[in-house]
Amino acid sequence: MRAKILLLMIVGILFSCSSDDDHQTKIINMRVNHYQNTGMGEGLFLTFLVQEGNAIGTDNWTKLYNTIEGFDYKPGKIYDLSVVVEQVKNPPQDASSLKYTLKEIISTQDVDPEILFDIDLKTNGQSFVTTNSGYELLNQIEIDCNTLCDALNAALENKDFVVGTFKRLPNNDLQLVELK
């Protein structure tokens, strides 16, 4: 009887141990867009807009809330990257279960500063525009609201969703050219 109990305990211990096979790592190709957008998670963020795998080269971009370790992002460039993606064991509740690390920059492409792009300025009543020292996206990227400052203030005050169309200025600040 004692041998059976001992055998059951050993089997139980062996099956309760986790293996390192759960710690998965893969390498992916990723394209990072020339501008960042805004997003909400456990706070407000500037997110990378990325494409992975078969989506590269399409019009479909997704928001990446993570950083990419070792990647020194500069606005105004589209990057093609090789990225190591690792599963994080026991991540904090407010953190991602994935870790991204730059393996290689495959290519970069400068984008014409006159190219227009859209950024979410307010989503579900939550504004991403800060006004501590002029207009900025989350106190990080300056916004030149041009002749649209009054319209921007009114939209941020009265609408739940506001999207701005921008172009990049030479110093990488953004110039607002239209509100949607």
Image (cartoon, helix red, strand yellow):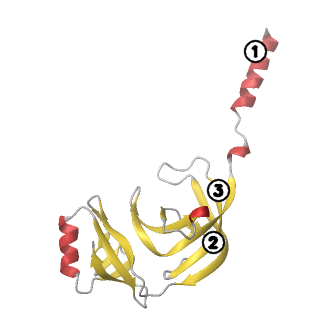
Residue drawn at (54%, 77%), measured in percent from left and top?
Answer: 73
Between tags 2 and 3, which lies in front? 2
Residue 117 percent across, percent down from the top left: 40, 77
Residue 103 percent across, percent down from the top left: 68, 69
Residue 89 percent across, percent down from the top left: 62, 48
SS at badge 1: helix
N-terminal of the pair, mark 2 or mark 3, is: 2
N-terminal of the pair, mark 1 or mark 2, is: 1
Which quarter of the rendered picture does the N terminus lie within? top right
Which amino acid type is shown beneath numbered disc 3? Answer: Glu
Residue reaching furthest to the bottom: 170
SS at badge 2: strand
Mark 1 residue crowding within 10 angstroms, few (<14) / some (14–19) / many (20+): few
Which amino acid type is shown beneath numbered disc 1? Answer: Ile
Residue for badge 1: 5
Left or right? Give the position of 157 relative to 30: left
Mark sitting on residue 81: 2
Left or right? Give the position of 147 relative to 50: left
